[in-house]
Image (tube, rainbow, N blue to C red):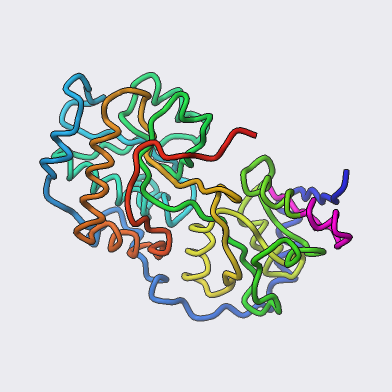
Amino acid sequence: MTHRRQFILTGMALGALLMRNALDIAYAAPTPHGSVDLSPEQAGRLRVQKNPAAIGAIDKRFRFAKEGYFSAAIVPHVPPTATYATDARTVVGSDADYAQLIADSLGLKLNLVPIAWADWPLGLTSGRYDAVISNVGVTEQRKEKFDFTTYRQGFHGFYVRTASPIRKIAEPKDVAGLRLITSSGTNQERIILEWNRQNIAKGLKPIEFQYFDDDAASRIALLSGRADVEFNPNAPLAYDAATTGAIREVGSLNAGWPARADVAIATRKGSGLMDALTVATNGLIADGTYRRSLARWGVESEALARSESNPPGLPKF
């Protein structure tokens, strides 16, 4: 193998050890996003009137999973895209807000269906829900089985602890020799492995890869100085940076690097719902509600200028 990997086992003992090394880390005061609403009531959630053009774009043969409702599957993984509210039952986040806006546009009530990530393809194919709104990236392989309506740019971000001397990561040489956290078997790992390959070919130091079983352990490693940088999906890291002030962004890449791949609503292939969702999303973009909704969660930087139906996706590898 041309690169070094450091696999790190997590658990209570490791957490305690790393936490002792992180005790002296000073957290900056939270930004305005630090007071983000995680209540189940979501009093600040934006709502819109129904969009006749979107309703008219629904194929007459399409049947919703639950009459009178737009049923959207969502993975309550981490904020700001989707997490559980303070009641540990209600799903909140930017994806939940967007799902509500789509339901409103279609003149329907919203039925959010919390699921595990691995379950969405089968659940969607079987008709358990109408769509999946949960940070799903467009890929050419997925397009063989599903239709897509884009609603957010797909970004991966490079983040360091606030006191780090690292100021910018924009190209492969910037990560040479660094201790870098990423997620195994993911698209972000594919990207950074290619950067590492290019660096080694040029005689630069290889990356020291670190893999963790959970986000808490990876954050402790970054804050304690056991890792130099984390490279993972941007939205959760941006939320952490905004609410704690403990980390900061030093660079970002589109998830489809060197091409482009956006985040989209997934629907059943040929179901007849995709075009209506695209019309609804572009209506939200046009009246400004879309960007204001993303801003509630601090992810307005990922806003799209226009939604597309089945755009080119990440190619097969």
Judged left or right of residue 10, residue 157 is: left
Task: State the image quarter where residue 177 is shown.
Answer: bottom right
**Residue 304 % position (x, y):** 37, 55
Count the marks: how many?
Answer: 0
Determine the residue positioned at 48% across, 28% down: 119
Determine the residue positioned at 33% across, 23% down: 270
171 lies above or below 95: below
**Residue 242 % position (x, y):** 47, 70
Q: Which residues are magenta?
A: 196-212
| Quadrant of the frame with the C terminus | top right
* Residue 202 colored in magenta in the image: yes
| Quadrant of the frame with the N terminus | top right
Determine the residue positioned at 69% across, 75% down: 166
148 lies above or below 213: above
Judged left or right of residue 128, residue 43 is: left
* Residue 88 colored in magenta in the image: no
Task: State the image quarter where residue 58 is shown.
Answer: top left
